[in-house]
């Protein structure tokens, strides 16, 4: 099922890209069923830096299911960033499956460096990169678009 859910997340990522956003998609499952979806919406409809795919998927989880969050799995096309990583921990998601590694901004490595309060709690099981042949091209387009946006908004001069 992991591969099928990641393929669905990739479809969501392409929808994000079609709407002018960075191509990252996520969904959350519970008992083998999709309960929530989210796509990157940082640029459109209006700029908001917190609208990452995982954050949007977390926001869309039905409230009555939160007591069972340890039984949920988040599928995302890209290794979660620091913000999404922290949010997945705080929401007590049981498992995170990602399609492509993010060598520039991925935060999976932080699982071994959490402060005591968090490391004593149950952190999600991280699995990935699980579908790089499908998700790596999405990551490369995401990185390219992100770098263009950063360079356009905050030009830097180098000596």
Image (cartoon, rainbow, N blue to C red):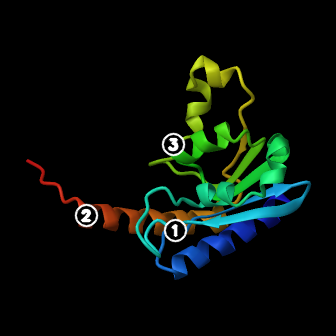
Vertical placement of residue 89 versus 38, above or below: above
Q: Name which of mark 1 and mark 3 comes first in the sequence.
A: 1
Task: Residue at 61% x, 71% y: name it.
Answer: 13
**Label disc, if present, on residue 82 of the rendered structure:** 3
Q: Nearer the viewer, residue 118 or 136?
A: 118
Residue lying at 22% horizontally and 59% vertically, measured from the top left: 154
How many C-alpha atoms fall within 10 Å of the one at disc 3: few (<14), some, or many (≥20)?
A: some
- Which residue is tagged 1? 41
Residue visible at 61% across and 60% down? 56
Please state the horizontal and vertical placement of residue 79, each as a whole percent of the image: 59, 50
- Image position of 56 (left or right of 45): right
* Residue on which disc 2 sits: 153
The answer to whether 11 is drawn above or below residue 49 in the figure is: below
- For this view, does 49 lie left or right of residue 64? left
Residue 110: image quadrant is top right
In the displayed structure, would residue 157 be above or below residue 69?
Answer: below
Sequence-earlier tag: 3 or 2: 3
């Amino acid at each position: 099922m992991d591969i099928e859910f990641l393929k669905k997340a990739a479809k969501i990522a392409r929808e994000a890209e079609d709407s002018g956003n960075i191509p990252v998609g996520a969904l959350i499952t519970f008992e083998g069923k999709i309960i929530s979806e989210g796509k990157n919406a940082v640029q459109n409809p209006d700029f908001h830096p917190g609208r990452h795919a995982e954050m949007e998927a977390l926001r869309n989880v039905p409230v009555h299911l939160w007591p069972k969050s340890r039984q949920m799995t988040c599928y995302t096309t890209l290794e979660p960033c620091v913000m999404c990583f922290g949010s997945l921990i705080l929401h007590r998601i049981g498992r995170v499956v990602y399609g492509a590694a993010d060598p520039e901004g991925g935060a999976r490595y932080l699982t071994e460096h959490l402060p005591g309060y968090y490391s004593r709690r149950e952190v999600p099981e991280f699995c990935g990169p699980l579908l790089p042949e499908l998700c790596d091209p999405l990551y490369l387009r995401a990185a390219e678009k992100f770098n263009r946006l950063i360079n356009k908004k905050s030009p830097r001069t180098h000596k």
